[in-house]
Structure formats: structure tokens, C-alpha cells
Image (cartoon, rainbow, N blue to C red):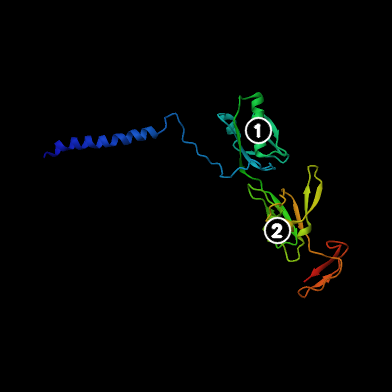
Amino acid sequence: MNFLSVRPLALAIALAGAWPLAAMANSNSSSPDAGPPAVDATPNVPTDLDHVLVPLDLLRVQVFQEEDINRQCERIEVSQDLTVTLPLIGVLSVKGKTIGQLSEAIRSGYDKDFLVNPQVSVQVLKYAERFVNVIGSVTSQGKIQFPDVRGLSVVDAIALAGGKTRLADLKHVKITRRNADGESEVSELDVGAMMKENGGQSVMLQPGDIVYVPEGCFDGGVPPPVNGGRLRPPVNGGGCAAGYRLMV
């Protein structure tokens, strides 16, 4: 067989096989006017719509098919005075608002004067660091950081502080919290009962709360020594004003 007579046939077969691949490549390629595919660089942080906003929360606000607004709302930080600033709307208070409530407030703001039936979404890019302080009769006193999404109960906070010491009095745990006027309010909880119920009725904490676990006291008469310990009378009415403290 002549080599020259075979070559055109082989070339035709090769071109026939290459054509579907070229067509597929052309169908998947973007037009000359289209830019590179968008890359979502948003951190993979789950957003809790019931999260109450706090200063330094970092947000991303998106309005459907409003690219100019979206470009300006890629990163919005909640200010120390609990406000955010948005295009067209301006300054918006987020005091006491959840993510879901803020989304609705933004939608209403744009719908009122600027857009027709806007579709708004609010995402948390980064939660502000939130802490409570756990002190007193726990294994490791100090700051306990909130989880990103779910809340933090008083039972969980004590557990994260290493748990109670042997002398801890869980029936009289005190929580100090600042109210909206900046004044401190103290409440007393029976955390021991909560723990017996597997935390089912546990009180949820707020950032900045102080959890104090006191030492146990012996009310009334003086009990016999336990495990070689001895009893110390209360000093200046502090801690165990109603009885005696056990020393080991």
C-alpha cells in the first residue's frame, strides 16, 4: 500500500475525532467579554440568624442583582456603638438585633426609598471574640471563649474551666452581668440542680458575664472533720458568713 495514499485518510480520521473535543472546549469556554469566573473567598463560617450582634462582628451584606451595593458591602464591621454603615441607607443601629432582624431592617431600608422588593442576605464573615470570666472554686480560673455559633451555658462554662473543685458550692453560683445602662446586676443560680438535669434547664450566658463559683459552707453546727480536714470560721463575714469553711 502506498504510504502517501494512507496519510490523508489517517488525517481525516484524526480530525473527525478532534472535532467533538474542540466543540466541547468551545462550549465550556467563556465569551471574550466575560471576565474570569468569580472566586468566593468568603471564609466558611456558619451564620446563626439568632446571633445577637456585638461590636467587631464582621459582616457581608448582599442584595440580589445590585452589584454596586454588593461591592461596597463585602466587609462591614459592627462599630463599638453598635452601628453599621450601608450605601444609600447610611448609618443603621444594630443594638439588640439578631442577624435575621438586621437582614429585615436592611431590606426595609432599601425597599422604602431606593429599591423595589429587594432580596437581602447577611452573612457573618468573622464573629468578634467573645468571652466570659469564670472564677472561684473551679480547676482553671480565667476567660472562656464563646463558640462561634451556638451559645454558652453556665454549665458549659464551668466545664470548660476544668470543672468544679472538691469544695465548690454549686447551689449558690453567682453571675454578674452589665445591663443596658452599664450597671452590674448579680443573680444566684443552683447550678448543681442544672447539672443533675444534664444542663436541660441551664442558663445561657452573655459576653462579658462573670461566673463566680463559691466554696461550700457548713450551715448551723460544726460537723466532724472530713478526710483529715479541719474547719475554719468565716473571716469578716465573707464567703461563708453563714457557717464554716472546710480546710484541707
Ranked by sequence position, the earlier of labels 1 and 2 is: 1
Q: Is residue 88 in view?
A: no
Q: Disc 1 or disc 2, which is closer to the eye?
A: 2
> Which residue appears farthest toward the bottom when viewing the image?
228
Tell me which residue sits at (70%, 37%) in the image.
Answer: 94
**Residue at the location (81% across, 48% down)?**
184
- Residue situated in front as seen by the camera: 32 or 52: 52
Residue 61 at what x, y percent from top left?
61, 35
Mark 1: secondary structure: helix
Q: Quadrant of residue 212?
A: bottom right
Q: The residue under label 1 is which amino acid type?
A: Glu
Q: Which mark is residue 1?
A: none
Q: Amino acid at mark 2?
A: Lys
In this view, the residue in front, 198 or 34, is 198
Q: Measuring from the top left, give residue 206's x and y in whole percent.
A: 72, 48
Would you place residue 96 above or below residue 134 in this image? above
C-alpha distance separating marks 1 and 2 = 40 Å
- Residue 238 appears anywhere in the view: yes
Q: Position of residue 19 (x, y in %)?
A: 29, 34
- Determine whether 188 is above or below 63 in the image: below
In the figure, is residue 233 to the left or right of 37? right
In the rendered image, the residue lying farthest to the front is 197
**Residues tagged 1 and 2 counted as in contact (Cβ below 8 A):** no
Task: Report which residue position mark 2 lands on.
Answer: 196
Q: Please state the horizontal and vertical placement of residue 126, each as a whole percent of the image.
A: 62, 44
Residue 91: quarter of image: top right
Circle 2 packing at 10 Å, graded few (<14), some (14-19), many (20+), is: few
At x 32%, y 34%, the residue is: 22
Q: Which mark is residue 104?
A: 1
Alpha-carbon neighbours of circle 1 within 10 Å: few (<14), some, or many (≥20)? some
